[in-house]
Image (cartoon, rainbow, N blue to C red):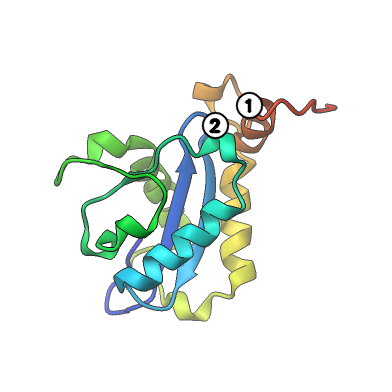
Amino acid sequence: MHFSGQSTALLMCIERRSRFLLTTKLADRKSKTTIDALRDLLLIMPHKCLKTITLDKGGAFYQHDRLPLSLFCDPHSPWQRGSIENANGVLRRSLPRKTNINHFTDQDINDTMWTDNTTPRKCLGFYTPLEAFVKSMGVALEI
């Protein structure tokens, strides 16, 4: 997610089945920075969630060969990555394009991410993405 007039950006990853969102702030939009941050995000995900990685064909993913797997979407085809496009729209309510992202701390970004992950979704049977993610991992939840 880019912000107007800034080199800083947000990297967003979504586990497609549960819609679980992970985000991290990027210091710049360079490929090395993006791939290093993506690799760090993927390291905290359970291995069973890493069957494929769907990447945009933007320049930020130029060094994709440093990742274990990759599957590119077609250029100019946002319908092939609907979950991330939807998440962009939801997060834009809190972080409009003209927002100075440098004024946000990592905790502010995490709070925005967790708000999204704890909002029930109709497509998930009114579970939250967090609940759906934990359930897909085989962990019992006490409600």
Closer to us: 134 or 2: 134
Q: Earlier in the sequence, mark 1 or mark 2?
A: 2
Which residue is located at x 53 percent, y 61 percent?
A: 40
User: As drawn, is 135 to the left or to the right of 26?
Assistant: right
Q: Is residue 29 above or below residue 119?
A: below
Circles 1 and 2: CB atoms closer than 8 Å? yes
Q: Is residue 140 above or below residue 5?
A: above
Location of residue 39 in the rendering, given as x and y in whole percent from the top left corner: 48, 59
Q: For the residue carrying disc 1, how many other residues have a C-alpha within 10 Å: few (<14), some (14-19), or many (20+)?
A: some
Tag shown at residue 108: none
Residue 93's image quarter? bottom left
Which residue is located at x 21 percent, y 64 percent?
A: 59
Residue 77's image quarter? top left
What is the total number of numbered labels drawn onto the structure image?
A: 2
Closer to us: 135 or 66: 66
Q: Which residue is mark 2?
A: 18
Quadrant of the frame with the N terminus: bottom left
Q: Which residue is mark 1?
A: 136
